[in-house]
Amino acid sequence: MTRRDAREAAFIALFQIDVGRAAMEPAIHAATRGKRVDDRSLEYLRKTVSGVIEHRADIDRTISRLAIGWSLDRMGTVDRNLLRLAVYEILHLDDVPVGVAINEAVALAKKFGDEESGKFINGILGRLAREMAANPDDTRE
């Protein structure tokens, strides 16, 4: 499983957790059903999904601050969960470059979202990237 495939599975698991109130492990299992998942991909999946769950309140505050004029409840479920995943990667995973997290979120938005999802996600994550560039010591843990 490639990192891109693992990221997509993480998004699907997060979506199931958000919409279906699924528990983490069953959501990960469902998102990877029928796929060959190596140990490295499974580690990324678990780390990412559990990280989003653990830091969800902070991630949601960040998204709410950046999404001017949009509440989390008003966002589409796809967009909201892709943003959660990407913001987690950007703020908490040192091995994921900011540009990669943004590009991958936009690609997933084009695959799973509506026709405006890619632009919406790119705009919010671009705002976060500009903030980070202006204040590099304040944003990444």
Image: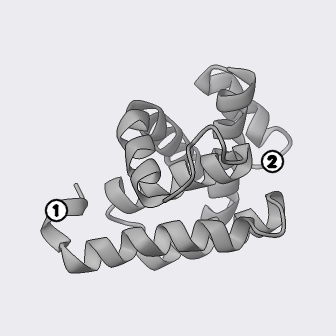
> Which SS class for mark 2?
loop
Picture quadrant of residue 139: bottom left
The residue at the point 42 percent across, 72 percent down is 127
In percent of width and height, residue 15 lies at: 70, 38
- Residue 54 x %, y %: 39, 31
Kindly identify which residue carries mark 1: 138
Q: Is residue 133 left or right of residue 101?
A: left
The residue at the point 57 percent across, 42 percent down is 72
Q: How is the model colour-coded?
A: one colour
Indicate the quadrant containing the N terminus: top left, top right, bottom left or bottom right: bottom right
Please indicate whether residue 39 sits to the left or right of residue 98 in the image: right
4 vs 78, nearest the viewer: 78
Does label 1 or label 2 sit earlier along the sequence? 2
> Of discs 1 and 2, which sits in the foreground?
1
Q: Amino acid at mark 1?
A: Asp
Classify mark 1: helix, strand or loop: helix
- The answer to whether the residue labelled 1 contacts the one labelled 2, judged by CB atoms less than 8 Å apart, is no
Q: Where the C terminus falls, by quadrant?
A: bottom left
Amino acid type of the residue that numbered disc 2 sits on in the rendered structure: Lys
Residue assigned mark 2: 35
**Dot 2 surroundings within 10 Å: few (below 14), some, or many (20 or more)?**
few
**Crowding at mark 1 (Cα within 10 Å: few <14, some 14-19, many 20+):** few
Q: Nearer the viewer, residue 45 or 17?
A: 17
Instruction: Please provide percent x and percent y for residue 107.
Output: 71, 71
Work out whether 30 lies above or below 4.
above
* Rendered position, 77 above or below 67: above
Q: Is residue 83 left or right of residue 15?
A: left
Reply above or below: 31 against 137: above
